[in-house]
Image (spheres, rainbow, N blue to C red):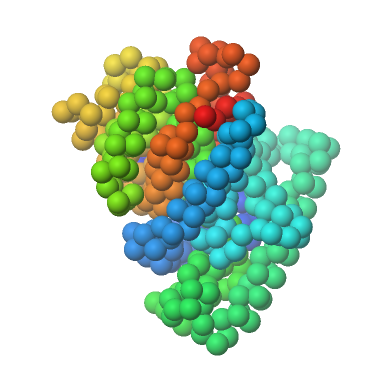
Amino acid sequence: AREIMKNQDVNFLNRAPMELADKLMYGRRDLGFAPYGEYWRQMRSVFTVHLVGNRKVQSFAKIREEEASNLVEKIRGFLNRKEEMNLSDMIVGFTNDVISRVALGRKYGNDDEMNFRKLLVELPQIVSVMNIRDYIPRLGWINKINGFDRRVDKLARGLDGYLSDILHERRERNKHGIHENGGEEASNLIDILLELQRENIENIRIDDESIKAIILDMFTAGTDTTSALIGWTMAELMKNPRTMRILQNEVRNNIKSSEDNQVKIPYLEAVFKETLRLHPPLPLLLPRESIRDTKLMGYDIKACTPVLINVWALGTEPSIWENPQEFYPERFLTESGKNIDFRGLNFELIPFGAGRRGCPGINFGMAVAELVVAELVSHFDFSLPNGETENDMDMSEKSGLSAPKKLPLIVIPK
Ligand code: HEM
């Protein structure tokens, strides 16, 4: 992993071509699936500087907080009824609402918008399917027979229709230069992209298809990954009541002693590192591809060789980690453990990848995940339904490019 993403990063900067990305992301005009080259470089700079840079992530704090409060209120609705609820579905809905508000400046109210929401939820699920045609082209006919091709075409048409309407609507609204927040600064990503398009900043030519593809990136790359992380964190906390109790105490004490909910809680960070170690949302990262012939640890690698990096194996490798299958956040609080971070420098823990093609949305995703988990564990205790205990919990993953929990997490809140 270090050889590919650090020492020879420049030789492995391409993404392996994926048919679904061609169809759904306007011929790979997004960032995540764009082939290596000038267009990718420009979009990467637009993304990291203008869309998910630190200042931007901070400016979306209010949206995160409002949506986390909405989730807490929804869960409160279950309290008196003592009913079980599907926490996994609620987490997916929450993540989607945050990203929709940030990206599109809107939430879903009427039926038409709810249809769009359904498509946005379906998008990352479809993209994460291991498409047989990418691996064994001769078996591609299977996708025609089982209806997969039709489903993808319908999804692409549906998304494009809604996104074109939204672009038109935002252009009309922004004609007078007044943004939703009444200020001069655009408050959502689609407005920022339209502004960049108008002003032709840094000589980057952004057409409508680039805007639509970049917006879809937020949903493909941002929602499934972030909700898988939140879902796994809650599942591991339910499975490990000792850890849940320590975390609840830490969070509740911190909230009491501080007005500022941006404060870092070391135990919460350790819980996230431990979850990302055991359940990386993209266990094989996003497939890369070599851009030229090279020699890798003595082997000859041809140009255009697809590369998969098994970060799940790195996170559970017994020669690196003590009791690797045990959920034990304290390992990240010891003298040696506290220096291990997930930002691409410590190759034993690289759930966000590393190097120039590493995830640009780390701060965005972690800000959403940290806030909502802190809110959930500080407001509620949770138990399992039907007298189940933590030993009965099924912790298997769904298979695909992303790996959320296979069975939904059903809980009773108190
Ligand atoms: C817990 C949440 C997340 C995880 C675990 C995650 C993980 C990853 C991984 C493993 C990659 C591939 C890295 C590589 O090839 O080295 C990636 C790429 C990417 N991620 Fe994330 N991600 C998360 C959240 C987000 C969010 C919230 C956004 C958007 C705001 C985002 C946007 C992207 C984009 C655009 C790329 C492609 C970058 C490129 O190809 O240049 N991610 N992510």
The answer to whether residue 349 is left or right of residue 75 is left
Where residue 33 sits in the image (x, y, percent)? 53, 52
Residue at 65% across / 69% down in the picture?
Answer: 166
Where residue 203 sits in the image (x, y, percent)? 43, 78
Query: Is residue 156 something that shows in the picture?
Result: no
Front in this rendered view, residue 231 or 305: 231
The answer to whether residue 314 is left or right of residue 20 is left
Residue at 53% across / 23% down in the picture?
Answer: 383
Q: Say above or below: 120 vs 44.
A: above
Residue at 51% across / 78% down in the picture?
Answer: 179
Which quadrant of the figure has residue 354? top left
Residue at 26% across / 43% down in the picture?
Answer: 257
Q: Residue furthest right?
A: 145
Query: Is residue 51 something that shows in the picture?
Result: yes
Front in this rendered view, residue 355 or 394: 394
Q: Residue furthest bottom?
A: 176
